[in-house]
Image: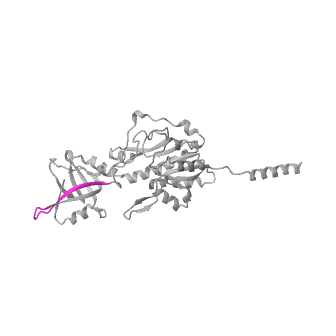
Amino acid sequence: MYSSLMLRRFCCFQTSSSSPPLKKKPVVFLGSPQVSATVLDALLSASAAADSLFEVAAIVTQPPSRRNRGKKVMPSPLAQYALDRGFSADLIFTPERAGEDIFLSNLKALEPELCITAAYGNILPSKFLNIPPLGTVNIHPSLLPLYRGAAPVQRALQDGVKETGVSLAFTVRALDAGPIISCGRLEIDNQIKAPDLLELLFSEGSKLLIHELPSIFDGSARLKAQPQDDSKATLAPKITPEESWLSFDEEAPVLHNKVRAFAGWPGTRAKVGVVDKKNGHENILELKIITTRVCSHYNIQSNEVDEITFVKGALVFPCGECTGLEVLEVQLPGKKAISAAAFWNGLRGQTLKKL
């Protein structure tokens, strides 16, 4: 009896130890800018855990493009990050369009269970969305259905909202209109700029994604996902360079919000007149406005006043409705950003006026 019991135990042990490990679910990640790397980092770290249910089987990103001053052809920031992490270059796909037949054929061959997108920047057609059986999940930096579209963070800051957030939602053919799995809210500081807010939201979105992945894999996320109320939807269209000009007929808070929203790219610009008091000669100068704040103690009595003054380290621009905008940092074409004080000192007694 004793020998028989030991034999059974030995046989059970042998069977258990020789059973193959569970196969991890293949996941494909799609993204392009640097903020996408935050999400990829979280996915790669989670997939490396001993009890992980998935592996990152491939990465899809925008094709290499000419960037920076040297105009060298460079991979997308996400692709570069993946290569730096040791990800195989053969598993980084860069189709011009996500509907290309060769790309879709390669994607099908991987048999992905799930696709995840974060600022990919390309429209996903139905024949793409039909490939992963668990669907495609997107991290969108707004509280959907608010700010659907290409520039949700920029448009939210431009509108001066006090709260935003990040949503995790299933992808459908309609723009950012899929059922919402989960979302997180965030209060907005009055001085935060778009690049910093974008990074913060995708960081929070990464945590949200990792938390929800088990429910996505077991199918319960699909059951609990809430449909969006399309009647409450707002749009966040892509920003154009033509929008970057500031008009000082607008109120200072409006201009301040625009400076924060357009920080990074395309930035905000203004033309000012530089007047030489000695001979009355005037030059027109184009400035990139980097950092601002709303002047809380501005006492201008007329909208006709156009003189730009220097007060306590800031260039003060008269704005609409008797408001004032304090400009703290500026940048001349082809130069580095400098403080308002350094710019003012460089005028050597010349005066400024708004145009």
- Furthest residue in direction right, as rendered: 1
Q: Is residue 185 above or below residue 316?
A: above
Query: Which span of residues is magenta-colored?
Result: 267-281
Q: Quadrant of residue 314?
A: bottom left
Residue drawn at x 46%, y 55% is: 63
Query: In the rendering, at what x and y percent does residue 303 appear?
Result: 16, 47
Q: Is residue 170 visible?
A: no
Q: Is residue 230 left or right of residue 112?
A: left
Please say whether residue 268 is one of the residues in the magenta stretch.
yes
Residue drawn at x 35%, y 47% is: 157
Between 246 and 122, the one lying in front of the other is 122
Between 245 and 298, the one lying in front of the other is 245
Q: Is residue 234 left or right of residue 7?
A: left
Q: Is residue 254 above or below residue 37?
A: above
Please say whether residue 226 is one of the residues in the magenta stretch.
no
Query: In the rendering, at what x and y percent does residue 207 appear?
Result: 51, 49
Query: In the rendering, at what x and y percent does residue 268 appear?
Result: 29, 53
